[in-house]
Amino acid sequence: MTHPVSGRLALASFAIAASLSMHASAQGKAGEAADFPSRSVRIIVGFPPGGATDILARVAGQHLSERWGQTFVIDNRPGAGGNIGAELAARANADGYTMMMTTAGVSGINPTLYKKLAWSPKNFEAVVAVGQTPNVFVVNASSPHRTLKELISAAKASPGKVVFGAPGIGTTGHLSGELFKTMAGVDLTFAAFKGSAMVLSDLLTATGITIAIDNLPPYVPQIRAGKLRALAVGTPKRTSILADVPTVEEAGLPGYLSYAWFGLLTPRGTPKAVIDKVNAETNRMLAMPATQARLADLSIEPMGGSPADFNKLIDSELKRWSEVVRRSGANAD
């Protein structure tokens, strides 16, 4: 039988040990953030160099490298709509030394578009939303369609004759077109291309697709040069990038929403202190006038916010796009 005093001493010793353990754990976590990064960090990009995802990763990586004195290496792993990079990132050590620059397509669409994925959204921790850009409805300058309402009328008069182009099955451009078809009650024919550059090239010839529905940045120079005409953007409010271009909602489709976003993720289990440190510094970067000017040149608007904010965005986008995928029957497998 345990003596009452001995029992109390044992309990007291246990409480002290537990308190010391918790204190050491807290110090350890604080130390993880204070010491991070102590070596090079990898940012995985599931797309080729030169695109918006890659450029944003390099903007963030350069800033963090200059701020913390460690190299941030951009690791391009293109293929399968960003899934090759996502799988690699999901399997990385959860220590903050591997991050991924994700997109609306990778984190918001792929989990429902692809029936067999080697990764899951649950494999990741949200760090921070970095930037966003509208999806744009754009035609050749010689097109008879001067407004989105005119294009809708033409599509209703000739079902299937209006052809919209986007860079691949399951991209935000493709599914933005499918959402538009449902909400406008029109039958459009979809033409898939291997990248925005090919969509843009086809549209400029005025011999193939009727309209492109795609991320805005690649089209801005040709719109400003007068070779293309933007009919509408998919954001709730007009974008400062092309302030005179109306929204799809203004064209008569209330509630329409279609835009691309980009943000940093880390593998599930990454210390919260490390995530918070990267989040805080990225938010600081996004508030800098020099960063905002650089993003404006890329036709991208800064986002920012907390990890919880970004996680909420990903969850809402998964729900929204899964319904579009279901209705359209789109399948990338």
Image (cartoon, rainbow, N blue to C red):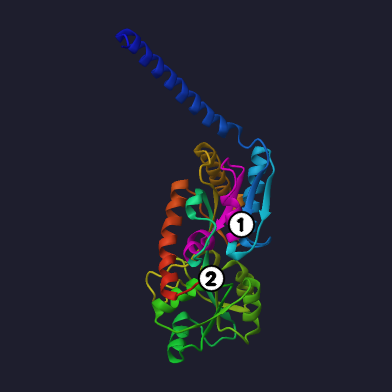
- Label 1: how many Cα within 10 Å (few below 14, some 14–19, many 20+): many
Residues 265 and 227: in front is: 265
- Residue 23 locus on image (x, y percent): 47, 23
Please state, as top left, top right, bottom left or bottom right, where the N terminus lies in the image: top left
Q: Secondary structure at mark 2?
A: loop
- Label 2: how many Cα within 10 Å (few below 14, some 14–19, many 20+): some
**CA distance for labels 1 and 2:** 17 Å
Residue 85: numbered disc: 1
Residue 220 sits above or below residue 50 on the image: below
Extent of the magenta region = 83-112
Residue 288 sits above or below residue 45 on the image: above
**Residue 167 is inside the magenta segment:** no
**Residue 107 is inside the magenta segment:** yes
What residue sits 49% from the left and 67% below the top? Answer: 113
Q: Which residue is mark 2?
A: 332
Residues 236 and 76: in front is: 76
Residue 289 sits above or below residue 237 on the image: above
What residue sits 63% from the left and 61% below the top? Answer: 47
Residues 231 and 332: in front is: 332
Residues 332 and 216: in front is: 332
Please state, as top left, top right, bottom left or bottom right, where the C terminus lies in the image: bottom right
- Residue 173 locus on image (x, y percent): 53, 71
> N-terminal of the two: label 1 or label 2?
1
- Residue 313 locus on image (x, y percent): 44, 55
What residue sits 49% from the left and 65% below the top? Answer: 115
Instruction: Answer with left or right where residue 233 lies relative to residue 294.
Output: left
Which amino acid lies under the numbered mark 1 shown in the image of this protein? Answer: Gly
- Residue 31 locus on image (x, y percent): 56, 29
